[in-house]
Image (tube, rainbow, N blue to C red):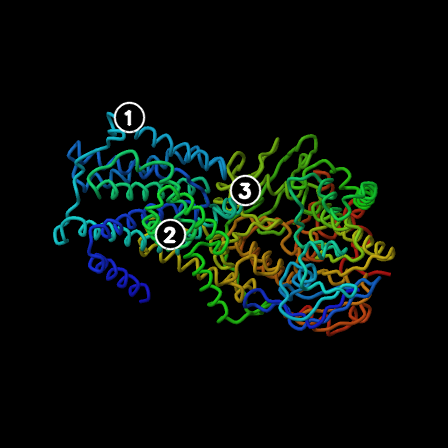
Amino acid sequence: MVRLAGVAVAVVAIGVLPHLFPTAYFTHLFTTIAYSTIVVIGLNVLIGFSGQISLGHAGFYAVGAYTTALLSAQHGWSLWLSFPAAIVAAAAAGFVLALPAIRTKGLYLAVMTIAFGFVVEILSQRWVEMTGGTMGVYGIPTVSVPGLPAGAVGYFYVVAAATLALQLVLNTLVGSLWGKTLVAVKDSEQAAEAVGIDVLRWKVLAFVISAGCAGLGGAFFAHQNGYINSDAFTFSTSLFFLVALIVGGLGSRYGPIVGVTVLTALNQVSAQLYEYRFYTLGVLLLGVLIFMPFGLAGGVSALRRRLRRRAAPAAVGLTAGPASAATTPVAASGAALSVRGLAKHFGGVAAVDGVDVEVRASTIHALIGPNGAGKTTFINLVTGRLVPDRGAVACADVALDGARPVRRARRGVIRTFQNLQLFSDLSVAENIAVGAHRHVHASTVEFALGLPRARRVEAEVQRRTAVLLDALGLTNLAERRPDEIAYGHRKLVELGRALAAEPTVLLLDEPVAGLNATEAERIRELLARVRAGGVTILLIEHNMDFVMKISERVTVLNFGQKIAEGTPETVQRDPVVLQAYLGRRHGAAAGAPTRA
Amino acid sequence: MLEVRSLDVAYGPLTILRAVNLDVARGEIVTVIGSNGAGKSTLLRAVSGLARVVGGSIRFDGRRLDRLHAEAVASLGVAHVPQGRQVIPDLTVEDNLRLGAWRLRGDRARVARLIEREYARFPRLTERRTQLAGSLSGGEQQMLAIARGLMMDPAFIMMDEPSLGLAPIVVDGIMDAIRGLNENGLTVLLVEQAAAYALAIADRGYVLKNGEVFLSGPASELRDDERVVHGYLGG
């Protein structure tokens, strides 16, 4: 209802704007704001949500503008065809640029996109036969829709309607699991891959969507005046889009419209001060970054988040309550995870040196050993984060060798990270929900339009998330961000995210480090139930009480080699293990350490 | 040495600590235990100037700390070994250690002595001295974080879960080391999940629950106190 009311207000506002400001100047200005917003909404998907930067968005904008201009003015295409062509051409350019670009990050990506922007700018200037260069393309047909006023006002309605529609689609998209997935890719690629998100594919997708939006914005620009030339597609245009986004608020839904409006207004006010316009832009950008680091719209929504939180009770500590684990049993027999002769060297150091481990299905197997013995490296090799020098890894008799981490995660080999890799911009509940990614079967289009299948998936994931939050005792912290909760609770979120993936083989790197005895006991019970559900668990842990109680088998590593293996009782008595790892106090008589 | 009086700490609208009183006398080992989210780490962060104090006071040797910046607190000789390691991944082990001695940067001979002292304490770090800290295993990073805290040659050190992610035999070593340091005059405030370890070496202990001091007393009494077991474990 709130949403419908918002749409109604927007529609009315669009309807009355040209009447409130009944001059050609203002109509032109509003139209410009509308299509620029389309471009910046796309840029927001790329930078604000997927975390990739583009300093060359004027390039995609130009591709869209020239495509529709040339097709309609010189080849007589209908606008019904030339507009989609503009979007497709820009999106295709985005795809081509993304393929090499996604392998780079940060500065390198920024430089690549700047280069792309310059290439397009130079082409539009110098490829005169095609683009008309600085003379431009003339006679681009104008848009007239039956029932709307002719001329500039009618055109404003068309562009504004498109902008509103795009805003609504993107609101749906970024508010859905789809949007959370994109943010997850931005926050931690490692963790995203570990739950089966194909990071490369998502980054390319963000590029394509963003470029497509820029193409649409460019197309609207081309048909505004019936004339375009290369002056409109310079680096400063790219900069305008970027600054508008930052001023409005990166990753904030209404950042684009706010930023574009403020910047366009400023440009008009300072039109007389044309030579100083970079100066004013710079001052504005600095001011926003210093006083409202999340931008104008971002600042407002952060404030709202704080106010909402005040209303909620500040709960601390673990809640007790019935817990049930949501897992799918697998029909497997024999070894769920089989590792043969696994080896990895770093420089001259053998981190893992020819290790064989068999983990039988539906058992809990512990991997212990001194610090630096190669335990985490072992998990990195099994999950595909590291490529082994030698050796083979198989999950339920299917060889995993050479498979990318995301493929292994899709097969159900799911891990947690010792040095927590939580998605810092997502809430606790969202972190866990994203974990279910490999069971989310709905397309981008379905999410964008809020179609039934996407809604069903979303509801199902939310239901499972709620169950897991309850099982882990995190329900009271569900809306907090990871950096707002205690270390031990973050640990539980890692575990929850892995469980949400409903793993076949679960690899836990120190699941109870930082938890007290009660909390560890709770995790022990939870893992026992998960195992009873058919999941195979391999865990690294230094809490011997926990290890000895929970595991059926224990493998001990030292200097990358297996030095012992067997039941907890045998390992605990093994003199080699006592000397290298446990120390006398923790040997056969496990339990609370005592001191003389 | 350290006097915390009716300390209130809040993050935005969330109250983390409420009217906390805590004392650490020179030469003591004092431990703070409690479940996750009880506010233990926040207490240490408040002392070292990393969390904003809303009410109450913190005094160190009579000086108010609660209005000082973190670097000013550190320069008074208060060391803080934070939770979660936080070593600098792109510097070598040795450079991380040197950085810990920033306060003593003029005194090269002393820094060199301190480095050798820490290598003797953690032979594993000696083997890795030229490696980048980011390439160490989790447990080795924990050792480095502790060693870096000690490089300041502090009079008072606060450690946030030094046992986290360490092999049992190393935890024993660390607890022995803490005791050894204490015998040589270092005052220690220790936050631990492994309550049994902490109470075994501490003189006194505080149990935090939901941001308030739930119990306090000599460690020997807390160890055997039924209420501690229930208050703390049931938290």
Residue A410 in view: yes
Disc 1 and disc 3 in contact, CB within 8 angstroms: no
Q: Position of residue A457 (x, y in %)?
A: 39, 56
Q: Position of residue A208 (x, y in %)?
A: 36, 40
Vertical relation: A310 (above or below) A571? below
Q: Nearer the viewer, residue A498 or A355?
A: A498
Give a yes or no on whether discs 1 and 3 share a subunit.
yes
**Chain letter of the residue beneath label 2 in the structure image:** A
Quarter of the figure that contains the C terminus of chain A? bottom right
Vertical relation: B168 (above or below) A126? below
Rendering quarter of residue A54: top left
In this rendering, would B31 be left or right of A527? Answer: right
Q: Nearer the viewer, residue A463 or B40?
A: B40
Marks counted in the figure total 3
Q: Amino acid at mark 2?
A: Gly
Outermost residue on the left side: it is: A146
Vertical relation: A302 (above or below) B55? above
Distance from the alpha carbon under mark 1 to that under mark 2: 33 Å
Numbered badge on residue A259: 2
Secondary structure category for the residue under label 1: loop
Numbered badge on residue B211: none
Mark 1 = which residue?
Answer: A127
Quarter of the figure that contains the N terminus of chain A? bottom left
**Chain letter of the residue beneath label 1 in the structure image:** A
Distance from the alpha carbon under mark 1 to that under mark 3: 56 Å
Q: Residues within 10 Å of mark 3 (few under 14, many from 20)?
A: many
Residue placed at 62% from the left, 58% from the top? A487
Q: Amino acid at mark 3?
A: Cys
Q: Nearer the viewer, mark 1 or mark 3?
A: 1
Numbered badge on residue A395: 3
